[in-house]
Amino acid sequence: MAHEVEQRSLAQYLEENHLKHTKQRQAILEIFLEASGHITSDEIYTRVRQQHPTIGFTTVYRTMKLLCEAGLASERHFDDGVTRYEIEHERHDHLVCLRCGKIIEFECEMIESTQLEIADRYRFRVLRHRHELYGHCEACRKDSD
Amino acid sequence: MAHEVEQRSLAQYLEENHLKHTKQRQAILEIFLEASGHITSDEIYTRVRQQHPTIGFTTVYRTMKLLCEAGLASERHFDDGVTRYEIEHERHDHLVCLRCGKIIEFECEMIESTQLEIADRYRFRVLRHRHELYGHCEACRKDSD
DNA sequence: ATGAAATTGAATGTGATTTTCAATTTCATT
DNA sequence: AATGAAATTGAAAATCACATTCAATTTCAT
């Protein structure tokens, strides 16, 4: 089994919360980590089924919630209205291609700090943010414009 | 009737697209403009009913889509999962209070230009963006932290 | 090995949004 | 003003993603 670090991290979360370590949870985490981010629970379900045909959609759905609580995944809602899960890591933002659906991550210190300035101006305490640029990626631009 | 400019703008869009100018559409636009932004179709429906008890939800829903296409409104999906409509105007961003739900708009030239730089770096053509800071507003902070 | 507690998965519920369709309304043309 | 083709309306039903229920199964501390 790969992803020892993450599996251990899940195990620890389960223990701490008196939850149980099942093969389903282990398998779903594995599949989720193999796919590189921004995947829907439906897509995870399909992939999980290939290796574990008995695992139900509900379990995938609930396990993804669990992984979020455990800090291993996080939910994202882009403008197409379906929930996507990404591997949890430091604050970053997204470029989303409206043609092919590709999602590129980027990070920008400048924007981060400007955000804090703005929040300050409105006496607002920022807990999290979303920052998404929608448009056409390089490949899709070549195809037509 | 108020909002002559917007009503005229709707009329023009309808004409150009061989669509029909109905009292329902006129009334819904009116109500939508009276309410100051970030309103759900359900809220619009409730308000519309007070003046026009025969207008159905479906019509409100469809008219809001129409207003978006006509460039008079635009859809926003904040993290609570319901579609909200706001009056279409130049690019701006949002502070969303996670406690009371208040939505504050802000604009920041600095962030706008940095966005373009980033898009450039990835050879990405930006068509629109969303930028939302989630946290606690001044009033809600006073209540507890 | 035991059994209380957690988990599973099928089925069902939910809530927002979207489509269907027959009846009605609009509006360019007579 | 009357006509009729095309668009619109609104009630009801369908859809979609997400969430809950519950009986059967599995986990794991003892």
Image: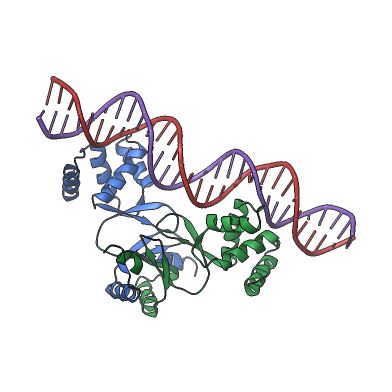
Chain colours: A blue, B green, C red, D purple
Q: Is residue A33 visible?
A: no
Residue A2, x across and y down, in percent: 19, 46
Residue A55 image-quadrant placement: top left
Residue A109, x across and y down, in percent: 27, 73
Of all residues shown, which one is farthest toward the front?
B143
Residue B90, x across and y down, in percent: 49, 75
Residue B87, x across and y down, in percent: 53, 68
| Pick the front one: B54 or D26 | B54
Could you tell whether D27 is left or right of B76 in the image? left
| Pick the front one: A37 or B72 | B72
**The N terminus of chain A lies in quadrant:** top left
Q: Is residue B30 visible?
A: yes
As displayed, is residue B1 above or below residue A5? below
> What's the residue at 60%, 66% (across, down)?
B70
The mark total stands at 0
Could you tell whether D10 is left or right of A100 in the image? right
> What's the residue at 45%, 56% (across, down)?
A80
| Pick the front one: A127 or B51 | B51
| Pick the front one: B65 or A3 | B65
